[in-house]
Image (cartoon, coloured by chain):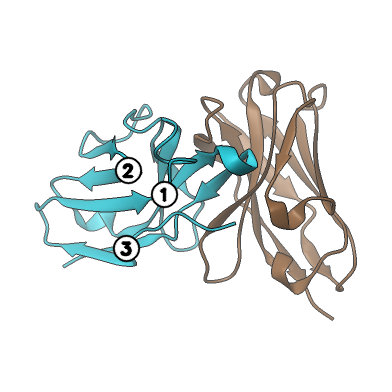
Amino acid sequence: EVQLVESGGGLVQPGGSLRLSCAVSGFTFSNYWMAWVRQAPGEGLEWVASTKEGGSDKYYVHSVKGRFTISRDNAKNSLYLQMNSLGAEDTAVYYCARDLAASGSYDCWGQGTLVTVSS
Amino acid sequence: QSALTQPASVSGSPGQSITISCTGTSSDVGGYNYVSWYQQHPGKAPKLMIYDVSNRPSGVSNRFSGSKSGNTASLTISGLQAEDEADYYCNSYRSSSTSYVFGTGTKVTVL
C-alpha cells in the first residue's frame, strides 16, 4: 500500500524556520518526481516545489524562491521542505505528493501537515 | 503567479452532465498536454481524476473525462451523483516560470 506521511508542522513565529518531512512507503521512491503543495485555510491549492527523481533538479513557485528548499533522501525514502523567513502568507496545510507522470499529475498524497505562522 | 481561471461554482441534478472549464494561456494550458484535474472533499487531501489532459488513473470512474481546446481545458462529469459534490481544481505546467499552477477552484453542487 502506498503511503505518504508528513510531519514537522506546527506554530512558528514570523521570520522563523521549519523543516517538513514526508516519509513514503509502498513504491520505489527514487523512480518518481515529488512535490509539495499547500493550501491556506479556506483557500485553493498552490503548487510550492518539485524535485526530480535524483534530486538534482528543483523548481519553486516564485513566492518561496530563496526561502524554501526542497530536498530528498532516496536511501531513506524521504522528502523534505526546509522553510526559512516564514511569513503569515505561508500559513497553510502542506501536502507532499507523488508525480505519476512527471507532468504535475499528483496521484498519491499525504494527509497534510499544518504550518501556522503567527506571533 | 496568476492562477488558471475556473468558474467559482457549477451545479447540476443527479444524472445530468456538467462541464468545468479551466482557462489559461499559450504558456501553460494551451502549450502543453500537462493538464490534470483534482477532486477535493472538505477536510480531505485532493484526489487525481484526470492527468495529461484526458487520461484517467486506475480506479477513477469513467464518468469523468477531460479535454482541451486552445487555451481552455475542460472536465466533464456525466451521470452526476451525490458523491461528486466537492471542489475541483485544474493544474498545468507553465513554461514561462518553469513551474506548475493550479486553477482557482470550482465548487460542484448536486441539486
Q: Color of chain B here?
A: cyan
Of label 3 and label 2, which has the lower sequence position? 3
**Subunit bearing disc 3:** B
**Subunit bearing disc 2:** B
Given the current orientation, which residue lies at the most extreme bottom position?
Answer: A119
> Do pointers 1 and 3 mark residues of a single chain?
yes
Indicate the position of residue A89 as horizontal and vertical percent values: 71, 70
Question: Where does label 2 land, which residue?
Answer: B73
Q: Color of chain A here?
A: brown
Residue at x 52% of width, y 71% of height: A42
Q: Which mark is residue B24?
A: 1
Quarter that holds the C terminus of chain B:
bottom left
Given the current orientation, which residue lies at the most extreme right position?
Answer: A16
Q: Is residue B92 toward the left or the right of residue B19 in the image?
A: right
Indicate the position of residue B93 as horizontal and vertical percent values: 52, 38
Amino acid type, callout 1: Gly
| The quadrant where residue B33 appears | top left
Front residue of this view, candidates B64 and A15: A15
Amino acid type, callout 3: Pro
Image marks 1 and 2: residues in contact by CB distance under 8 Å: yes
Quarter that holds the N terminus of chain B:
bottom right
Residue at x 80% of width, y 25% of height: A56
Amino acid type, callout 2: Ala
